Amino acid sequence: MKFNTIIFDLDGTLLNTLDDLSDSVNTILSSHGFPLRTNNEIKQFLGNGVGPLMRLAVPSSCTDEEVAIYLDEFKKHYEQNMDNKTRPFDGIMEVLIDLHRFNYNLAIVSNKFDLAVKALSKAYFCNLFSVSIGESPTVRKKPAPDSVLTAIKELGADIKKTIYVGDSDVDVMTAKNAGIPCIGVTWGFRSREVLRNAGVNYLIDTPREIFTIL
């Protein structure tokens, strides 16, 4: 077996979270009289965590102090509304169930804040993932390798048999920084070209294709 440990990104890879993220962002923007953002704009803002998401979503004239307030408001709203429209991408559940059945080590590593990552993992994937790690004050976010390396350690896995699966250039850089290969998925929030330009090792168009690489 070439790989026995698979670490997944969450947003844009396992779950289509775009509508719920957009709704929460626009709720905050609307409450302050700011222009709303389209789903396509929100999609381009994703990948580096909710802090950068809100910084990009609000008018550039907003101060860091103001953005911090809006970010807190966003988190509170999103915590209550993060699974209104969110769904696993087509084919994901079947593949995860098979991977779990075949005894692969599975983890989630995301730049979404940790509370949301753990809540969504529990809500949608039950016991399929034994480790789920999000952004927190104690671990540097991606593309730093810290969260990936922490997941490998918590799984008791061999880094030489570990591969990362994600949909963005940040994911590709994270894998490189951790010293592991990356599978780029084309159904997420970034284009095939973005992933290729970032130096992704593999590209797949459907979840089932992951088995051809493993």
Image (cartoon, rainbow, N blue to C red):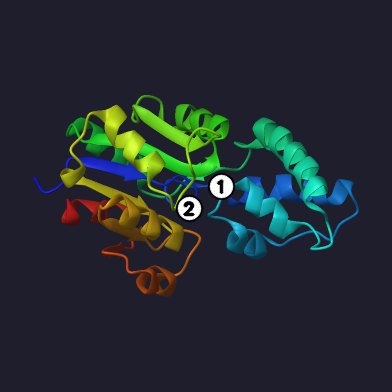
Q: Quadrant of the N terminus?
A: top left
Asked whether, in this view, residue 102 is left or right of residue 80, the answer is left
- Upstream in sequence: badge 2 or badge 1: 2
Asked if the residue at tag 1 contacts the one at tag 2, i.e. Cβ–Cβ closer than 8 Å, the answer is yes
Q: Closer to the camera, 70 or 153?
A: 153
Dot 1 alpha-carbon crowd within 10 angstroms: few under 14, some 14 to 19, many 20 or more: many
Residue 53 image point, x, y percent? 65, 53
User: What residue is shown with label 2?
Assistant: 12
Residue 156 image point, x, y percent? 22, 29
Q: Amino acid at mark 1?
A: Thr
Report the residue at 41% width, 55% height from top: 171
Q: Amino acid at mark 2?
A: Gly
Q: Is residue 188 above or below residue 66?
A: below
Residue 46 image point, x, y percent? 57, 56
Q: Closer to the camera, 169 or 127?
A: 169
Q: Closer to the camera, 199 or 26?
A: 199
Can you name the residue that lies furthest to the left here?
1
**Which label sits on residue 17?**
1
Report the residue at 65% width, 59% height from top: 42
User: Dot 2 lies on which element?
Assistant: loop
